[in-house]
Image (spheres, grey):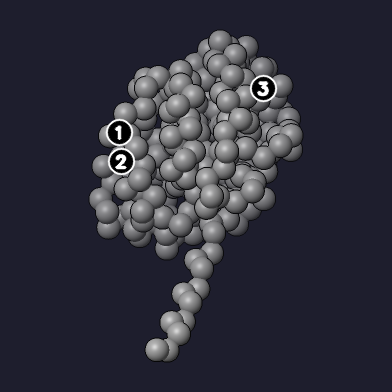
């Protein structure tokens, strides 16, 4: 499963780091961080597919995967050989064939303005989770509009939802997202200073209570959606 071996106790939501470039100082700090997993941006920002094997050694036992972005990468076998656990696909540039790579977990990246019909259709795809990768990561305050976006998407999904947030998001914002049922939070690692805030956020998450509808443990990368409960037969009058 998509599980972080270093997580000592269950938390309401997992905390993932987004790595936009292969900065050695940052990469060398990842294994000993409080992160539950790492997302590598493969494409135009300095990380090549051929670098993944070297990068994965720095991650230790931490689950990791790639964000497809605008990459022309099309070989799932290379990802598996590099030790990747999952791939984050998008709706416009990811070939549908990646869903046939059974040794990888699959997460679908979406944007806040995704049409209702497409959001509803995601539940029928062979992906384990959904990643809202824009819209909530522009500041330390979570507004009502942000919650409405998340709630609209959650209304269509039985799959876990991950969202990209600012590393400066305050504790009330974290609590609001957890209260909605968001299962994963993704923070950009732009410099080494981000790790201090990541530790703080992880500590905050450890104090938050799980929503009543949530499972007792959050795991990655193969996040299994909850099975719908059977409807109870109505008793005859």
In the rendered image, the vertical position of residue 67 relative to residue 103, given as above or below? above
Query: Could you give the CA–CA distance between mark 2 and mark 3, rounded to whole angstroms?
Result: 32 Å
Query: Within 10 Å of the Cα at label 1, are there few (<14), some (14-19), or many (20+) other Cα atoms?
Result: few
Residue 135: x and y in percent read 33, 31
Disc on the earlier residue, 3 or 1: 3
- Look at the picture and state if 201 lies above or below 177: above
Question: Nearer the N terminus, badge 2 or badge 3?
Answer: 3
User: Where on the picture, by quarter, is residue 177?
Assistant: top left
Please identify the quarter of the rendering in which residue 112 is found.
Answer: top left
Query: Is the C-beta separation of discs 2 and 3 under 8 Å?
Result: no
What residue is pinned by disc 2? 148
Label 2, residues with CA under 10 Å away: few <14, some 14-19, many ≥20: few
* Residue 231, x across and y down, in percent: 46, 74
Q: Secondary structure at mark 3?
A: loop
Q: Are marks 3 and 1 in contact (CB under 8 Å)?
A: no
Q: Can you say whether 209 is above or below 170 in the image?
A: below
The residue shown at (32%, 48%) is: 152
Would residue 120 be seen by someone viewing this image from the given angle?
yes
Closest to the camera, between mark 2 and mark 3, is: 2
Residue at 43 percent across and 28 percent down: it is 173
Q: Which mark is residue 144?
A: 1
Measure the C-alpha gap from mark 3 to mark 1: 31 Å
Q: Secondary structure at mark 2?
A: helix
Q: Specify whether 65 is left or right of 53.
A: left
Is 235 on the left or on the right of 143, as rendered?
Answer: right
Q: Could you say which quadrant of the image residue 118 lies in?
A: bottom left
Give residue 30's position: percent from left, percent from top. 65, 22
Identified at 27% across, 54% down, the residue is: 116
Label annotation for residue 33: 3
Q: Report the quarter where the C terminus lies.
A: bottom left
């Amino acid at each position: 499963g998509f599980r972080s071996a270093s997580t000592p106790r269950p938390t309401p939501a997992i905390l993932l780091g987004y790595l936009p470039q292969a900065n050695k100082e940052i990469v060398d700090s990842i294994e000993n961080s409080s992160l539950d997993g790492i997302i590598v941006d493969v494409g135009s920002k300095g990380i090549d597919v051929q670098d993944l094997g070297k990068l994965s050694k720095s991650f230790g036992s931490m689950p990791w995967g790639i964000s497809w972005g605008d990459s022309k990468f099309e070989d799932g076998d290379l990802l598996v050989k590099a030790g990747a656990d999952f791939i984050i696909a998008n709706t416009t540039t990811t070939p549908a064939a990646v869903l046939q790579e059974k040794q990888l977990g699959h997460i679908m990246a979406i944007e806040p303005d995704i049409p209702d019909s497409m959001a509803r259709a995601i539940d029928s795809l062979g992906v384990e989770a959904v990643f809202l990768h824009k819209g909530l990561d522009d500041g330390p305050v979570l507004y009502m509009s942000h919650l409405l976006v998340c709630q609209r998407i959650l209304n269509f999904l039985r799959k876990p939802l991950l969202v990209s947030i600012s590393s400066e998001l305050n504790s009330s914002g974290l609590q609001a997202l957890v209260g909605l049922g968001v299962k994963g939070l993704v923070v950009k690692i732009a410099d080494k200073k981000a790790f201090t805030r990541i530790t703080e956020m992880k500590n905050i998450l450890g104090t938050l209570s799980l929503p009543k509808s949530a499972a007792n443990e959050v795991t990655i990368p193969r996040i299994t959606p909850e099975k719908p409960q059977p409807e109870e037969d109505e008793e005859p009058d």
